[in-house]
Amino acid sequence: MKFSIAGTLVATAALMDAASAVPVINAFSGFNLGANKPDGSCKNVQDWTDDFNTIKSWDSRFNTVKLFTTSDCGAIMNAAPAAIATGMKIWVGVWAVDTGKFDNEKGNLEAAMREYGNAWMAGVNVGSESLYRKEIDPKLLAQRIYDVKGMVQGAYGASQVAVGSADTWTAWVDPANEPVIDACDVIVMNAFPYWQGAKIENAPQVFRDAVANTRSKTKGKPFVVGETGWPTDGPNFGDATATVPNLQAYWSAIGCELRRDQVPNFWFSGFDEPGRESAIEKNFGIAKADKSLKISLSC
């Protein structure tokens, strides 16, 4: 959304008023979801509705999902009405690297808020591991976070919706990224002991260390686990092996611990995604592509 000078002043004033009340992040548990069906085609409203109802059937406390895009496959315009219909909340992902893509993503979020309001929104992250990949200057990412905050919290009055960025714990502890921390209402941290080559026996402590390291550098900002999980098939990575028993062990340790400690979190991911290029990333689902669970989710 392009603001006029007058519009920018109004939005900025509203955002300054909202800043006095930092958005509260309540405890939730949920899953990351892609915008494509297993055959690669785009999800429509009914597909999103089916996904949300499936997740809620696993446990009614799974009440929030995180999306990676607003524009790809018309994701947010299809997912928002499904969320309203099922009582699911959506943590919105806005890609931030390319200017044209960012403007398109922001425009789609604006259209969804104009059409469906904001009660379905749990939060927004601007950027997803773009600092880790060194795809964007931290100061530019910070500007884009402020830009989205101005629209969401200021122009559209959703002062309760936290806006931040999602990145790896290694990015959050890098001093070069401090401008992004300052811009964020919330720190969304991704951490995968699998990708650190950890044995499954050591994985829970590796994850806990990532959380502690992140929190030591992020100035007491509200904290969400944006991604963690364990694959069930594909090649080994160091001492990490991709098996169903290891997913069960990691869920029983960390999935249950996050719930017990009431840490807001999203597991990566809800369902296997056969369309991904990586043999490992195809198999990170807590459920198969047909939506059947791989493991027990009891704690």
Image (cartoon, rainbow, N blue to C red):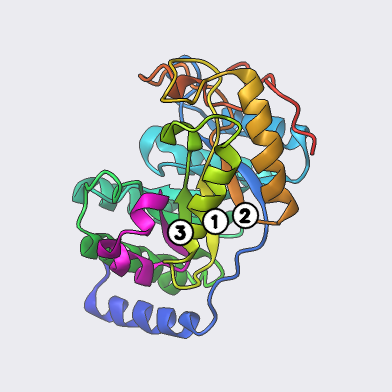
Q: In the picture provided, is 131 more to the left or to the right than 232?
A: left
Q: In the picture provided, is 4 more to the left or to the right than 289?
A: left
- Judge the density around disc 2: few (<14), some (14-19), many (≥20) Cα neighbours within 10 Å: many
Badge 1 or badge 3: first in the primary sequence: 3
Q: Identify the amino acid type marked 2.
A: Pro
Q: Which residues are magenta?
A: 163-186
Residue 133 position, x and y percent, is 26, 43
Q: CA distance from mark 1 to mark 2?
A: 5 Å
Q: CA distance from mark 1 to mark 3?
A: 11 Å
- On-image quarter of the N terminus: bottom left
- Judge the density around disc 3: few (<14), some (14-19), many (≥20) Cα neighbours within 10 Å: many
Q: Identify the amino acid type marked 1.
A: Val
Task: Write down the quadrant of residue 286 in the picture.
Answer: top right
In the rendered image, the vertical position of residue 71 relative to residue 169, given as above or below: above
- On-image quarter of the C terminus: top right
- Judge the density around disc 1: few (<14), some (14-19), many (≥20) Cα neighbours within 10 Å: many
Q: Which residue is mark 1?
A: 224
Q: Identify the amino acid type marked 3.
A: Thr
Q: Which residue is mark 3?
A: 214
Does 173 appear in magenta? yes
Disc number for residue 264: 2
Q: CA distance from mark 3 to mark 2?
A: 15 Å
Residue placed most toward the observer, 217 or 178: 217
Q: Residue at x 66, y 35 (%)?
A: 251
